[in-house]
Image (cartoon, helix red, strand yellow):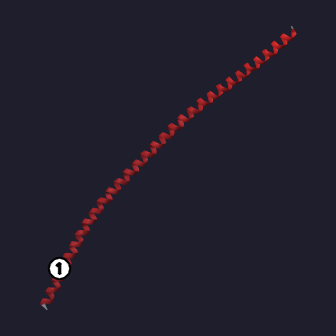
Amino acid sequence: MVQHVEQNLQLMTKRAVKAENSAAKLKQENALLQVQLKNYKTENEALRLGQSASLAAVKRNADLALQNLLTVITNSQSSIKQLVSGAESLQLIADLLKSIDRISEVSEDGQ
């Protein structure tokens, strides 16, 4: 009976050692996972900040492009008005030149 108790004690000791080893391994794995989690959180935060910075840069670029576009529109409208005015002036000159031809034809016939 003493021998049986000793065998049970040895078996329980082996189980306890095995459980302690398993617990130690799990503690190490848990510590490693905690470090990885912290690193992932840091990386995630950095990505969020980078995304915010990228969005801000895109917004600044869009605002600048809009300002440039509005400037081009204003300048082109002014140029178009000048072209129309110039075309009207040329049309007036062409009409005057036609009138001069008619006047000179009448004058030549009238002599």
Which residue lies at the image location 53% right of the left edge and 35% below the top edge?
67
Quadrant assignment, res 56 = top left
Q: Identify the residue shown where x is 48% and y is 42%.
A: 59
Horizontally, residue 89 falls left or right of residue 38, namely right
Q: In terms of depth relative to the viewer, which is nearer, 105 or 51?
A: 105
Residue that extends furthest to the left in the rendered view of this protein:
2
Q: Nearer the viewer, residue 57 or 90?
A: 90
Q: Which quadrant of the rendered structure holds the C terminus?
A: top right
Quarter of the view holding residue 109 = top right
- Seen at 32% across and 57% down, the residue is 38
Which percent across, then down, holds residue 70? 57, 34
Q: Position of residue 89 (x, y in %)?
A: 70, 21
**Relative to residue 64, is residue 109 depicted above or below?**
above
Q: Residue furthest top?
A: 111
Query: Where, by quadrant of the figure, is residue 12 drawn?
Result: bottom left
Q: Which residue is mark 1?
A: 13
What amino acid is labelled 1 in the image?
Thr
Mark 1 nearby-residue class (10 Å; few <14, some 14–19, many ≥20): few
Q: Nearer the viewer, residue 79 or 33?
A: 79
**Vertical position of residue 4 compared to residue 60: above or below:** below
Q: Is residue 73 above or below residue 53?
A: above
Where residue 27 sits in the image (x, y, percent)? 25, 67
Please state, as top left, top right, bottom left or bottom right, where the N terminus lies in the image. bottom left
Give the structural element (helix, strand or loop) at label 1.
helix
Residue 83 at what x, y percent from top left? 65, 26
Residue under the point 39% across and 51% down: 47
